């Protein structure tokens, strides 16, 4: 007998038929003798509608009341799922974040979990009752409902699995696992049976939409084994049909590169002719930080005149105009010549813990892109990834070329 947490996203509970399908999947785990807690998101589209209600009444709304409204989507789903389980003869009840309690800080709309009180939940699980928990929500020190930010149900599930000391946390979604790259672009992409926390964290932060970044961070911190699998299909003859996200020690032979991620949510800014003196970088990036603009890739080089410098960096595409306004406002202080902005770029990254023990990974990437006539605009690296910025029009060509170059193509 195992204790497992099952999480179902918005598409998995998108209508009544799908909620009934979820109930059947949960029943199968109960029938196998497991103790089961279920975490559910709001039905697909519901949270967006609730957010729309809030902003239509007050664009600058009270975040505490915003949380009270948007958390209601998960309350509905948890109740419906409990009812569906009861119809199948499975004892079940719904739990809201404040009932457990999932205690958070008081940063409404993007709260962070501090602790989860599991004593009563564990008692119920030991009697065979299924706990259906509303994801995405908790309770503040002041007793107000809080929400964890978009995608927070993944974080709720992993946090609950850690608190319950669960054997596994299964994240059911609309894909059947983690692939070497986007299978919609690269037909030869392979589903991975296992991937390390670090690789998954890099993939999630670099554009892969399978898991939410905070949930992977929490799983890695607490050693929660996470499995990604589909709500809509099950591989024949496989007990674990999805992808397991595990500690590096569980993977005997590391691949050089495990996957290739890409992000279209990038924009490039270049400041030309910036004064070459100490403190200039702080002068550029300080105002951007104050405006809550996240800066990612950065490269600095000497200008053509040799007396000044050019600074190129990337920001989220949605923050491009805000970043431009901040820098133009500070132009007199920064004393740069021109500002160039380009939103038609994409960041492509190769990821793999095997890079730690192998040389030549970046060189293979650069050579493969050069052979396809793709110019690299910016480069950044970490211990287990190499990222490049290229023109957006070359996205598909780059992904296919790199997938083949690193031997990731399915046979």
Image (tube, rainbow, N blue to C red):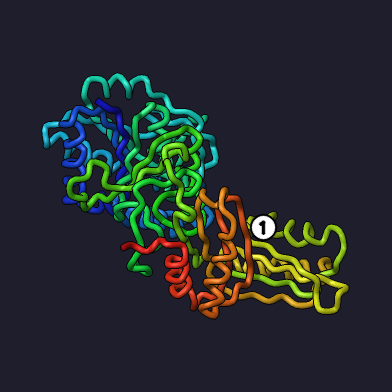
The N terminus appears in which quarter of the rendering? top left
Q: Is residue 219 visible?
A: no
Which residue is depicted at the point 53% across and 35% down?
105
Q: Mark 1 highlights which residue?
A: 291
The image position of residue 82, as x and y in percent, is 21, 36
> Is 360 located above or below residue 122 in the figure?
below
Q: Answer left or right for 344 relative to 23.
A: right
> Is 100 located above or below residue 410 in the figure?
above
The image position of residue 380, as x and y in percent, is 63, 60
Asked where in the image residue 319 lies, by quadrant, the reply is bottom right
Nearer the observer, 121 or 46: 121
Asked where in the image residue 321 lies, by quadrant, the reply is bottom right
The C terminus appears in which quarter of the rendering? bottom left
Q: Answer left or right for 373 relative to 14.
A: right
> Is 246 located above or below residue 315 in the figure?
above
The image position of residue 323, as x and y in percent, is 65, 66
Circle 1 — which element? loop
Within 10 Å of disc 1 (Cα), the crowding (few <14, some 14-19, many 20+) is: few
Q: Is residue 404 visible?
A: yes
Asked where in the image residue 361 lies, by quadrant, the reply is bottom right
Q: Answer left or right for 320 relative to 81.
A: right
Q: Answer left or right for 347 relative to 133.
A: right
The image position of residue 125, as x and y in percent, is 27, 24
Which residue is depicted at the point 16% across and 51% down?
17
Which residue is depicted at the point 80% across and 71% down?
302
Nearer the observer, 36 or 356: 356
> Is 182 located above or below residue 342 in the figure?
above
Give the total of numbered labels.
Answer: 1
Nearer the observer, 96 or 207: 207
Which residue is depicted at the point 38% across and 46% down?
194
């Amino acid at each position: 007998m195992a204790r497992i947490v099952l999480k179902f996203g918005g598409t998995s509970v998108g209508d009544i038929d799908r909620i009934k399908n979820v109930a059947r999947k949960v029943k199968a785990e109960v029938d196998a003798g497991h103790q089961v807690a279920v975490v559910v998101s709001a039905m697909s589209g519901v949270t967006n509608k609730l957010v729309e209600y809030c902003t239509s009444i007050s664009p600058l709304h009270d975040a505490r009341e915003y949380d009270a409204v948007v958390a209601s989507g998960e309350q509905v789903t948890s109740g419906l799922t409990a009812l569906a389980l009861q119809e199948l003869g499975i004892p079940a009840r719904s739990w809201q974040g404040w009932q457990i309690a999932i205690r958070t800080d008081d940063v409404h709309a993007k709260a962070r979990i501090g602790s989860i009180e599991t004593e009563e939940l564990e008692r119920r699980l030991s009697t065979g009752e299924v706990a259906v928990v509303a994801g995405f929500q908790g309770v503040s020190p002041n007793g107000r409902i809080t929400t964890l930010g978009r995608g927070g149900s993944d974080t709720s599930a992993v946090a609950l699995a850690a608190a319950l000391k669960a054997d596994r946390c299964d994240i059911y979604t609309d894909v059947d696992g983690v692939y070497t790259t986007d299978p919609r672009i690269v037909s030869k992409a392979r589903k991975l049976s296992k991937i390390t926390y670090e690789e998954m964290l890099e993939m999630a932060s670099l554009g892969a939409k399978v898991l939410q970044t905070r949930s992977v961070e929490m799983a890695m911190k607490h050693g929660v084994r996470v499995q990604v699998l589909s709500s809509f299909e099950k591989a024949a003859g496989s007990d674990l049909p999805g992808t397991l996200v595990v500690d590096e020690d569980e993977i005997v032979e590391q691949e050089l590169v495990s996957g290739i991620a890409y992000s279209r949510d990038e924009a490039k800014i270049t400041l030309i002719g910036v004064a070459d003196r100490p403190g200039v970088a702080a002068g550029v990036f300080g105002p951007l930080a104050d405006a809550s603009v996240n800066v990612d890739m950065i490269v600095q080089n000497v200008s053509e005149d040799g007396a000044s410098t050019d600074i190129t960096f990337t920001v989220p595409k949605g923050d491009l105009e805000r970043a431009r306004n901040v820098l133009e406002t500070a132009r007199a202080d920064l004393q740069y010549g021109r500002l160039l902005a380009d939103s038609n770029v994409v960041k492509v990254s190769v990821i793999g813990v095997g890079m730690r023990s192998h040389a030549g990974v970046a060189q293979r990437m650069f050579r493969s892109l050069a052979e396809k006539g793709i110019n690299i605009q910016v480069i950044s690296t970490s211990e287990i990834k190499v990222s490049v910025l290229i023109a957006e029009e070359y996205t598909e060509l780059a992904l296919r070329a790199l997938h083949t170059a690193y031997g990731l193509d399915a046979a």
